[in-house]
Image (tube, rainbow, N blue to C red):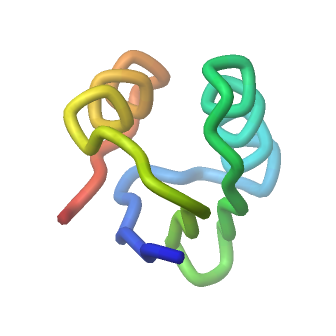
Amino acid sequence: MKTYKIKGLDCASCASLIEMDLEEKGIICKCSYAKETLEVEGKHDFKMLEEIVKKSGYNILQ
């Protein structure tokens, strides 16, 4: 499992939207508004992850 910091989350619903967007692409994850983190399971392409998160309006830090 890899953990990333997410910047720009406004509420728990924002975290849920990120989870849904990533899960649509087959990425198993857990996003926490309170901790401002994204935990991703298994192998994944960071560039694709970053693109999806940015498209949702948030920043991800490696």
Q: Please identify the quarter of the rendering in which residue 32 is found.
A: bottom right
Residue at the bottom extreme, as displayed? 35
Q: Residue at left 61%, top 31%?
A: 22
- Residue 58 position in % (x across, y down): 38, 39
Q: In this rendered view, identify the residue nearer to me: 10 or 60.
A: 60
Q: Residue at left 72%, top 62%?
A: 30
Q: Quadrant of the C terminus?
A: bottom left
Above or below, 17 against 1 in this view is above
Left or right: residue 50 versus residue 11 is left
Above or below, 8 against 34 in this view is above
Above or below, 22 against 6 in this view is above
Q: In this rendered view, identify the residue nearer to me: 11 or 62.
A: 62
Left or right: residue 39 versus residue 32 is left
Tally of numbered discs: 0
Q: Residue at left 58%, top 83%?
A: 35
Q: Residue at left 67%, top 79%?
A: 34
Left or right: residue 39 versus residue 19 is left
Left or right: residue 52 versus residue 19 is left
- Residue 26 position in % (x across, y down): 67, 28
Above or below, 26 against 27 in this view is above
- Residue 57 position in % (x across, y down): 40, 27
